[in-house]
Amino acid sequence: AKEQFNWDEYLKETESVAAPLHCFRQSRIPPTNDFKVGMKLEARDPRNVTSVCIATVIGITGARLRLRLDGSDNKNDFWRLVDSSDIQPIGTCEKKGGMLQPPLGFQMNASSWPMFLLRTLNGAEMAPAAFFKKEPPKPVPNCFKVGMKLEAIDRKNPYLICPATIGDVKGDEVFVTFDGWRGAFDYWCRCDSRDIFPVGWCSLTGDALQPPGNNVSITKSSAKIQSSPSKVTRRSMQSPQKSAPVPAQRGRKPGRGKPPGQSAV
Ligand code: MLY
């Protein structure tokens, strides 16, 4: 049987604290996901954010929807929370006097868009308005601190939510570092990003939380805070070459480690 990732143990092992709930632009109680595969809705085109398009729910994962724009290919799926402001019921765009647009990379001749739109909506199962939840308000100010733990979307593999650590804080932005991945997936984002979640989010929503990678040392947030390293030092702790050599299994006691390779996708 696969050993489940356990935040309580992990926070102890890493002598870290979870970022407080009020730091995040996420509802304290995650929204329920009532959507069903096949339902249609309106979504902002992630590759062309001024366009509102028709999207189909391709999959459900926790409080998120896997979406594909109608008329697009299957290589550009994206994921949105059910309380994302990027999605809305069909009819919303027209009500606001807007026009539904073909997705970027519409697979047919542009002139066939009006007919395509009619056909794709004809007989479609439209997601009911009640399924769309109100986006939570922005938290102000930025209250994240270096070393705090969280769950974050891997933007290179956006279906994945992973254990992460705040690596730096600057104004309204935070540097999200992925535990055990040597910096390759780290990114800066606004503190009110919808891509970051409090510890425990996945277990509440039923989304799958990836285990940390096993490539690098754990960073003890207490150590980081106490030694108050300069920005340069902190950065170098995350860089692949300069990180200290570490025992395998991130120093876990024998027998408690995860089998290697679990997190590779
Ligand atoms: N197997 C892929 C994906 C890695 C995902 C890393 N995330 C979880 C931070 C790779 O190694 O590139």
Image (spheres, rainbow, N blue to C red):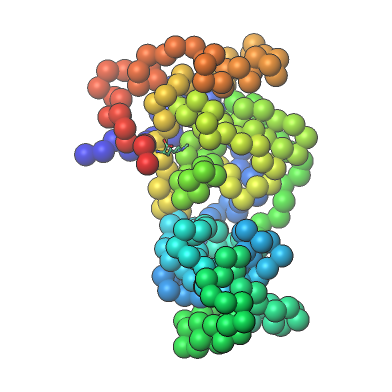
Q: In this view, does 210 lie above or below 123?
A: above
Lateral position of residue 111 relative to residue 172, left or right = left
Residue 222 position (above or below residue 37): above
- The correct choice, above or below, for 38 with respect to 150 in the image is below
Is residue 18 among the parts visible in the rendering? Answer: no
Quadrant hosting residue 27: bottom right
Which residue lies at the image location 54% right of the left edge and 28% below the top edge?
A: 183
The answer to whether one can see residue 67 in this image is yes
Q: Where is residue 153 in the image (x, y as percent from the top left)?
A: 53, 44
Of 53 and 203, which appears nearest the observer?
A: 53
Tell me which residue sits at (47%, 58%) in the image: 75
Whether residue 42 sits left or right of residue 214 in the image: it is right
For ligand 1, which image quadrant applies?
A: top left
**Front residue (pair 180, 209):** 180
Picture coordinates of residue 102 (x, y %)?
61, 73
The mark tally for this picture is: 0
Q: Residue at x 61, y 59 (%)?
A: 46
For this rendering, which residue is in front, 169 or 239? 239
| Residue at (43% x, 66% y) in the render | 58
Picture coordinates of residue 26, whole percent (x, y): 61, 51
Q: Which quadrant holds the C terminus?
A: top left
Q: If the image is split into quadrants, where does the N terminus sit?
A: top left
- Looking at the image, residue 94 sits to the left or right of residue 257; the answer is right
Tell me the quarter of the picture where residue 51 sits. Answer: bottom right
Position of residue 9 measured from the top left corner of the image (x, y, whole percent): 40, 28
